[in-house]
Image (spheres, rainbow, N blue to C red):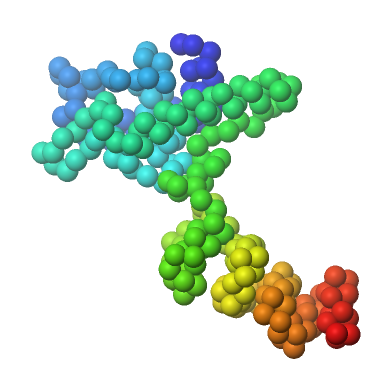
Amino acid sequence: MTRPAQSFVAVIVASLAWAVTAEAQQPAGRGGRGGAPEPPKNLQILPKDIPRPELIAVMGSFARGLGVQCSYCHVQEPTDGRDDMAADDKAPKKTARVMMKMMTDLNARLGTEVGKPAAEMTRVQCVTCHRGIAIPKQIADILVETDTTKGVQAAIAQYRDLRKQYYGSMAYDFTETGLTLPAQQLVAANKPDDALALLQLNTEFFPRSVATYAGMAAAFNRKNDRANAIKSFEKVLEIDPQNQNAKRQLDQLRAQ
């Protein structure tokens, strides 16, 4: 086994106990003579002689990291259909190989350039970026894209759906910044009304969020709505009386 391959497997394999359990759950009928599993084929990044339990552990880490099933990358069709784990038909499988190489290279560079002993390194894994979702976009980027293509009501509906499905997981940022950041982007794009719609939604979940009301003030300022900008900063000071930035901007608005 080459050193990069050893490094890659060491990062991924969390427990052989899980691997043995996963192997026991594999469907029957895919083995060779006597029902024994066939050896893996078409391994291009992982070592060709990798023990089967380690291979299953690696594949399991991919599935968990991306929140997908084996069929996301592999050809696995329903009963009596085609079942060819070695086939390269699917684009995600080809992308996975690129990502595996990138991850191995990044971990190697970190170890060299940071200068920490290997035992002290926090190594990059699939889950580091994917966080349990196949396409690891940040929720701010998702909402701004939806707002641009389908409108703010579609973005609001999308946020509610994602929150219902993923809340409590590591997939998306459902803290108050999950909506204040895309609102800032929308204000910068001269779409203050859309920003206000997202910020109003945020008050359902974070009714005392200073960042939310400060964002509203910025959106109202972009609309040249001084009266509501003042009200928004007053709300900020109601929640955080020592907020000097809000005091300063409120004084400036009142002086105009």
**Coordinates of residue 129 in the picture (x, y in percent):** 54, 42
Nearer the observer, 29 or 99: 99
Residue at image position (58%, 33%) is: 124
Q: Residue furthest left?
A: 80
Query: In this rendering, would 45 be left or right of 6?
Result: left
Q: Residue furthest top?
A: 1
Please, is residue 200 above or below residue 129 in the view?
below
**Coordinates of residue 73 in the picture (x, y in percent):** 32, 37
Residue at image position (43%, 68%) is: 150
**Which of the 4 quarters of the picture holds residue 191?**
bottom right
**Coordinates of residue 224 in the picture (x, y in percent):** 71, 82
Nearer the observer, 24 or 186: 186
Q: From this viewpoint, is residue 223 visible?
A: yes
Residue at image position (83%, 82%) is: 253
Q: From this viewpoint, is residue 13 visible?
A: no
Nearer the observer, 247 or 71: 247
Query: In this rendering, would 78 be left or right of 148?
Result: left
**Coordinates of residue 149 in the picture (x, y in percent):** 44, 65
**Which of the 4 quarters of the picture holds residue 30?**
top left
Please, is residue 207 above or below residue 107 in the view?
below
**Which of the 4 quarters of the picture holds residue 121?**
top right
